Image (tube, rainbow, N blue to C red):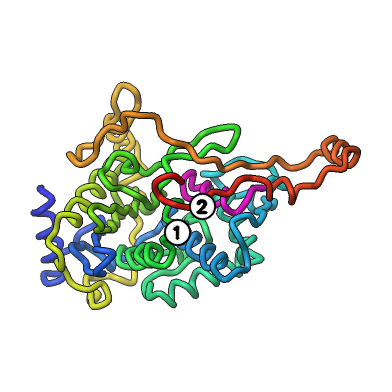
Amino acid sequence: MSLATLLAAAMAFSASGTAFANPKMVIDVGTGRVIAHQEAFRKWYPASLTKLMTAYVTFRAIKSGRLSLETPVVMSKRATDQPASKMYVKPGASMTLDAALKILLVKSANDVAVAVAETVGGSTENFVAMMNAEAARIGMSSSNFINPHGLPGKGQYTTARDLAVLAVQLKREFPDYAGYFALEGIATGAKTYPNFNMLIGRFDGANGMKTGFICASGFNQVSSATRNGRSVISVVLGSDSLAGRADESADLLQKGLTAPQGTGEPLASLAPYGPDRDAVVDISADICNPKAAKVRSEGRDDAGRMVVHSPYITEMVRPPQFSEATIISPPTPEKDEAKSATGGAGLARQIANVPVPIPRPATF
């Protein structure tokens, strides 16, 4: 089915009531108009797209002056105990809030997400309350969060429409921090990590934002791109693979960037539609089974790379650029003794001396 046919069917959804899976949306950031949508109000597990809200709450705390990008983030035992994806550091390891945000949005580390929540909110529970308060304030009317990282659990859900609301808010309210979502990769000192977003450096104008995956949600992605001064955001939920979500995202972004100005209806006036909107969709049986895994493995080339099919995604012809996100190992008794003997300045000063660049999309 062509993209045009798919989008036409999606537009007919609200009138016909026919059921679709795989919620999608593309929206113009400047006008706030929804160019196309499908199952936009279907409740879905956000997976690591949750970290967009974690970043939003953190940016708000920095804007208020309570914290800065140099604020130390120290890994607690609770943080390091989180399931993967994670950095596998020991309690007491630390980094700047700047480095933590990079790791959060590129590596999607769940342990760092909890450490950030504890730093910003004082506790994970208080931070989650902040997440839900902010979601309600900006109009995410069908979302609820129970943790800062997106691992599944009862009461954790969102919709394509609500994620579009959040992404637009991030773009409009925090343009100075847009570079965090556009990183091609990070270097922690011991290892480098490329961005899971296959559009960065491969789709003309791509500049963010976040990917996510759990069995219950499938492969999710919120993407953004800017060309000729026009910015659009796409939301894809429940795709069947890394390459699938990249293909769908690229096609939607291209659709949005080339649609006539003024196309679509305002996001604020998009009326809820679709049956069974109270239930959270769980597609684990379709995503995490041997047959699906085999199909995904066959969709790789000889080098093990996922094969994309969208004509709007091109091969990256240079190595990715990695941004520094230094993690400082926890002090050992030997290090403490040496530090005392030499009059060392301590962990806080070590963290403060990590260079913190000014966020900007092109060079961050």
Q: Determine which residue is flagged by label 2.
A: 358
Identify the mark at residue 237; answer none if there is no mark. Answer: none
Q: CA distance from mark 1 to mark 2?
A: 8 Å
Residue 40: image quadrant is bottom left
Number of marks in the rendered image: 2
* Circle 2 crowding by C-alpha within 10 Å: few under 14, some 14–19, many from 20: few
Q: Where's residue 96, x and y in %? A: 63, 51
**What residue lies at 27% left-to-right and 70% top-to-bottom?**
276
Please check the rendered image and state whether residue 7 is part of the magenta-colored stretch, yes or no. Answer: no
Residue 329, visible in the rendered structure = yes
Q: Is residue 78 above or below residue 200?
A: below
**What residue lies at 41% left-to-right and 61% top-to-bottom?**
175
Q: Determine which residue is flagged by label 1.
A: 176
* Circle 1 crowding by C-alpha within 10 Å: few under 14, some 14–19, many from 20: few
Residue 131 left/right relative to 239: right
Q: Where's residue 116, x and y in %? A: 59, 57
Q: Amino acid at mark 1?
A: Asp
Q: Amino acid at mark 2?
A: Ile
First-in-chain label (1 vs 2): 1
Residue 15 left/right relative to 154: left
Q: In this picture, which residue range is highlighted in magenta?
A: 94-108
**What residue lies at 30% left-to-right and 36% top-to-bottom?**
291
